[in-house]
Image (cartoon, rainbow, N blue to C red):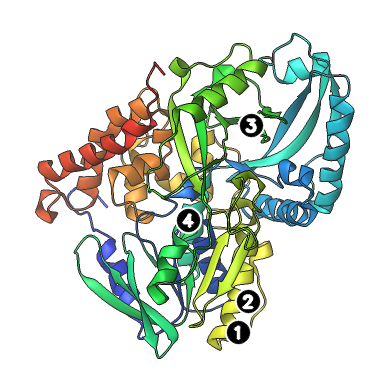
Amino acid sequence: MTQGSAVDPRPAQLRAALASPEWDIIVVGGGASGLGSAVEAATRGHRVLLLEGHDYAKGTSSRSTKLVHGGVRYLAQGNVSLVREALHERGLLRKNAPHLVRDLGFVVPAYDWWAAPFYGIGLKMYDVLAGKLNLGSSTYLNRDKVLSRVSTYQPKGLKGGILYFDGQFDDARLAITLLRTLEDFGGVALNYAPVTGLLKDGEQVRGVRFRDEESGQEHEVRAKIVVNATGVWVDDIRRMEDPSVKPMLSPSQGVHVVVEKKFLPGDSAIMIPRTDDGRVLFAVPWHDHVVIGTTDTPVPQTDFEPRALEEEVEFILRTAGRYMNPAPTRADVLSVYAGLRPLVKNEKTDGAGSTASLSRDHVIRISKGNLITLTGGKWTTYRRMGEDTINRAEKLGGLPERLTITPGLHLHGWSEDERPDHWKVYGNDAERVQQLPGADVTLHPALPYTEAELRWAVRHESARTVEDLLSRRTRALLLGARASMEAAPRAAAILAEELGGAGAGKDAAWQAQQVEAFRQIASGYVLSSGA
């Protein structure tokens, strides 16, 4: 495709969504649980349509700590079954997407004489639960070895530490990889297509009504079974069937800050095992930057752009400052982001109490009209969540019951080739991306991304807005909020060109609107220098 011959892919996607008189399965929600369920269905040979109201991974699924992990904290809480399942899935995902998941060593510091043996015993259990899929054995490190791996640990009082291994990934890129995998297996997906109602035959839910946000038109699509996988918004969909339904969730907010690599210059991550609020704190090298988090703050309502509270940012910086030398300050924060966890209420207490104590297990509930709701869980177990959901969907929808193939499935782009960090996420598509115009033109001096990547995202990854391009197809917004705002005008120009230019309504005014919309969102990722 050359300049002037751009073809907008969305009309074809919309036609495909409307082409079938009845789908086997409609999945509502394009985050980890929805994409995982849709891929599971498509790889079993079912005809599946996925509808996402905003963009893929717009919510929680692009705002994680960037870890594929069993959950050391859950082990301390005694939830051995969750940890065992997550460690198993961690190992599978490492094999299924080596271009997106890598092994990462974590150093737990010991500043008390008892700390190293205490944490060492727990982490040996972590190794045992991982079984054959373990990424590496945990080991004791003396003081010098701790500092050789993490030179920025506070040396005063340091006795030693424990090294253990978990996985790391790029969450939004995994979502896009699952989207491409879904399409590889004949599934159809459409973003910016919010579901506005459910279709029923009697009491049975047999389809959905959705709005195409770009045209404003409403459409109806039918299916044998509908899966509600909308994360923290599952109760909104459930109320479309029964307005009096009791809410399932007690959402909580997790905040992270991103700083320069100099605060953690090696290849190891930091895990601080006991914070003031009873959580663990991670500092993780990611895309040549460092992500530090997280918090667990109950929130009364859900928002598509949750904002970090001042006290959350201060908690992260204060806790990190006790262990890191030099300590990151507000002025060092390149970006701050918040995500909402879809934590399922304890039915006995109706959600009373701390969200930190709520289970991270996934939950599947079936309504009177056979609407399947999947929520809870975490990225690491996305595949298992999808498998469990489609097992139920086959039975309820009268579909052929087929065995899963996803434990050994190579996800789209599968590649074990070593590439520079930001190219690696494309896997074996990287060469094709680099053949597009602008592969050698970076968007901004402070960002690694190129113009070619934006073109690829529009042509092949369903990017529709500047936010899609700079927040999730590339991770520019997280790596540097101010830099991403400065890159927005060029991103808007490329987006307009790829979508057909002024002749398709993507004129200078449209571009300015896109830039302004992105800057409004990105401003919330910038941390003011004062409290």
Q: Residues within 10 Å of mark 2 (few under 14, many from 20)?
A: some
- Observer-side mark, 4 or 2, equals 4
Mark 3 and mark 4: span between their CA atoms? 24 Å
Q: In the picture shown, does residue 370 fall above or below 330?
A: below
In the picture of the structure, the residue carrying the numbered disc 3 is 282
Amino acid type, callout 1? Lys
Mark 1 and mark 3: span between their CA atoms? 41 Å
Amino acid type, callout 4? Val
In the picture of the structure, the residue carrying the numbered disc 2 is 391
Q: Taking the image as drawn, is residue 50 in sight?
A: no
In the picture of the structure, the residue carrying the numbered disc 1 is 395
Q: Percent from the top left, x then y, of residue 414?
A: 58, 53
Of the numbered discs 3 and 4, the one sitting upstream in the chain is: 4
Mark 1 and mark 4: span between their CA atoms? 26 Å
| Mark 2 and mark 1 residues within 8 Å of each other at the beta carbon | yes
In the picture of the structure, the residue carrying the numbered disc 4 is 232
Q: Residues within 10 Å of mark 1 (few under 14, many from 20)?
A: few
Q: Nearer the viewer, residue 524 or 384?
A: 524
Mark 3 and mark 2: span between their CA atoms? 35 Å
Secondary structure, mark 4, is: helix
